[in-house]
Image (spheres, rainbow, N blue to C red):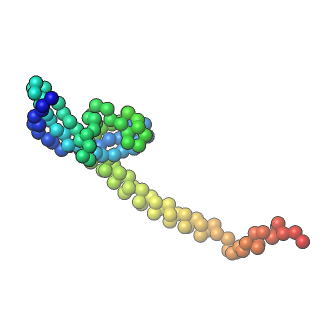
């Protein structure tokens, strides 16, 4: 069957799995064709390989789930950046608290292994 390639467009989508929470983005080349009978059809390619339409049967690349939310490109990266910014100050705050607690709770005496094993020593 002969076909005529009409146009190729580039689009990207963001995906979020509602089962496992995994998020990812993928860009596609979408080729719009018309067959010899005048029927239009579309071919999706991602990373140079033909793939099914991500809009009709999205599948999570992490868990294989099919309950996937599709969003405009940049949404996953934006959320990941926001989460990273929120975690960085919290991580520093937790680390500072851990240092303060461990310093305050540390005994004045430095224990040696022999001190710890002393109760088990039989003469």
**Nearer the observer, 85 or 80:** 80
Whether residue 80 is visible, yes or no, is: yes
**Which residue is located at x 26 percent, y 47 percent?**
47
Query: Which is more toward the observer, 111 or 46?
Result: 46
Indicate left or right for 91 with 13 as reference: right
Q: Quadrant of the C terminus?
A: bottom right
Visible residue check, residue 73: no
In screen coordinates, is 3 left or right of 83? left
103 or 82, which is in the foreground? 82
Q: Farthest residue toward the top?
A: 37
Q: Which residue is drawn at 12% across and 32% down?
A: 3
Q: Count every numbered label the image shows and give the total.
A: 0
Q: In this view, does 101 lie above or below 36?
A: below
Return the residue nearer the eye: 9 or 121: 9
Residue 106, horizontal then vertical, whole percent = 64, 69
For this orientation, the residue located farthest to the front is: 1
Quarter of the rendering occupied by the N terminus:
top left
Task: Say which quarter of the image contains residue 117.
Answer: bottom right
Identify the residue at horizontal 26%, vertical 35% (top origin).
53
Q: Is residue 108 positioned above or below 12 on the image?
A: below
Residue 10 image position (x, y, % from top left): 18, 44
Vertical arrangement, residue 86 with respect to residue 33, above or below: below
**Residue in the picture at 38% in, 42% down:** 61
Horizontally, residue 104 falls left or right of residue 42, namely: right
Position of residue 20 measured from the top left corner of the image (x, y, whole percent): 43, 40
């Amino acid at each position: 069957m002969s076909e005529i390639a009409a146009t190729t467009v580039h689009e990207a989508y963001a995906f979020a799995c509602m089962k496992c929470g995994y998020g990812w983005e993928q860009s596609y080349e979408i080729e719009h064709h018309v067959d010899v009978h005048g029927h239009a059809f579309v071919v999706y390619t991602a990373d140079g390989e033909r793939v099914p339409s991500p809009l009709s049967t999205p599948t999570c690349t992490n868990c294989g789930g099919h309950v996937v939310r599709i969003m405009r490109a940049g949404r996953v990266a934006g959320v990941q950046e926001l989460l990273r910014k929120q975690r960085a100050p919290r991580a520093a705050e937790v680390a500072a608290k851990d240092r303060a607690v461990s310093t305050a709770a540390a005994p004045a005496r430095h224990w040696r292994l022999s001190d710890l094993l002393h109760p088990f020593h039989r003469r």
